[in-house]
Image: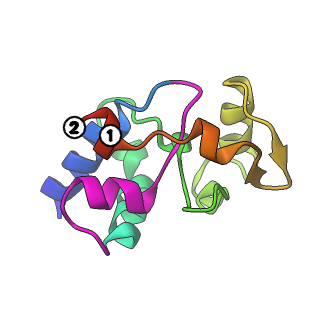
Amino acid sequence: MSDFFTQVYEVVKQIPAGRVTSYGAIAKYLGTTGSARMVGWAMNAAASHPEFVPAHRVVNRNGLLTGKHHFDTPNAMKELLEAEGFEFDGDQILNFKERFWDPGKELG
């Protein structure tokens, strides 16, 4: 499992500021389509990784902040994304499709 988490972290560390991706897109890129939930588990444990992992840039497939409860405060994820220029309707990222970063396309 730790090898999978490390692979997830290496992908997440490449997401540029101002962009987001989804749990499923990471799973697909890693060749483990259907393991989006495991990517979520990796994001939940990202704080224990020795290097910074921008876990706030990983959201669900609809652009919802479903992982926000795993941050220090319930608003931390949203605040980090707002600092990168994101706008929201509740916990839904506005212009999600335009801000989506697909590791399969971006990393080849």
Q: Quarter of the image containing the N terminus? A: bottom left
Residue 53 quadrant: top left
Q: Is residue 67 left or right of residue 104?
A: right
For the record, the magenta segment spans 17-34
Expressed as whole percent of the image width and height from the top left, the position of residue 74 reads 73, 53
Label 2 secondary element: loop
Reply above or below: 1 against 75: below
Label 1 secondary element: helix
Q: Amino acid at mark 1?
A: Lys
Q: Spot the residue most to the bottom.
A: 34
Q: Is residue 49 magenta?
A: no
Q: Are marks 2 and 1 in contact (CB under 8 Å)?
A: yes
Q: Which mark is residue 108?
A: 2
Q: Nearer the viewer, residue 52 or 78?
A: 78
Q: Which mark is residue 105?
A: 1
How far is disc 2 from disc 1 in space, using C-alphas? Answer: 5 Å
Q: Quarter of the image containing the C terminus? A: top left
Q: Is residue 31 magenta?
A: yes
The residue sitting at 31% across, 30% down in the picture is 51
